[in-house]
Image: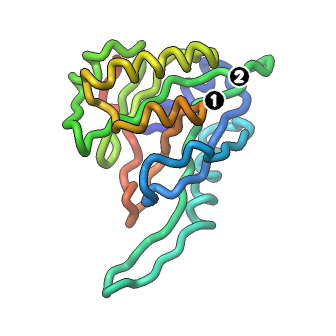
Amino acid sequence: MEAEMVVKMLFDTHQVKRFSCIEFDPNAPYPVDADQPYSWKKWRGTRNIEKLSRRIYNRSLVVFKFEGEDIYLYKILGLGSKVKVEGGAVKHMRMLDFDDDDTNVDINKIKDIGLPRGIVLKTDNSYHYYGSDLVSEDGWKYWIQSLIRLGGKKQLFGSTYLPLCLERGYSTLRLFGYKDTSKQKTPVVVATI
């Protein structure tokens, strides 16, 4: 199962009406700036979110040659953790991006940190996590802070990832991969917790 179906299940289960998202350049130095603005989009199903992602990518794509190599510049859709549910309340999805490049992350290490029930997906170079529940703003902040405290012991995240999420007030993950880019692989489910 791919990331968009995981999101569909979560949105349908929790009666999500609107979702937050950003456009970001995955080739820019990570992490994305703390002041990265997000926008709200109406949830109309996976086809709608796939079209939005494709439109962002196509509109931003620039290909040029440098020393005989094709260089791709582009932006992709980042799904934000903030969602609006039936009745208008703003909640957060539990979303994490594990840093496999520096820390040799594997499924067992992810399971060992005691995350709430959820789903783990494999990407090109890392893992993503979506929790099964939605939490309040305060609940989300408390959860991220607890992961920061755990971070030094387990080293599953880049050193700036969780503090950045806390500073900007939301997490973000990509849903789709694009051929000939640094993000070719669409995240796919590899485990449940």
Q: Residues within 10 Å of mark 1 (few under 14, many from 20)?
A: many
Q: Is residue 157 left or right of residue 171?
A: left
Disc 2/disc 1 C-alpha distance (Å): 7 Å
Q: Is residue 127 visible?
A: no
How packed mark 2 is, by other alpha carbons closer than 10 Å (few <14, some 14-19, many 20 or more), is some
Residue at image point 19% right, 37% down: 104
Position of residue 105 in the picture relative to residue 184 (left or right): left
| Quadrant including the N terminus | top left
The residue lying at 49 percent from left, 40 percent from top is 173
Task: Specify the label residue 82 is tagged with.
Answer: 1
Residue 46's x, y, as percent? 60, 40
Report the quarter where the C terminus lies: top left
CB within 8 Å, label 2 to label 1 = yes
Identify whether 4 is placed above or below 53: above
- Residue 18, by quadrant, is top right
Q: Residue furthest right?
A: 87
Task: Determine whether the residue tagged by mark 1 lies in a helix, strand or loop.
Answer: strand
Say which amino acid is labelled 2: Val
Total labels: the figure holds 2
Residue 44 shows up from this direction: yes
Amino acid type shown at disc 1: Lys
Determine which residue is flagged by label 2: 90
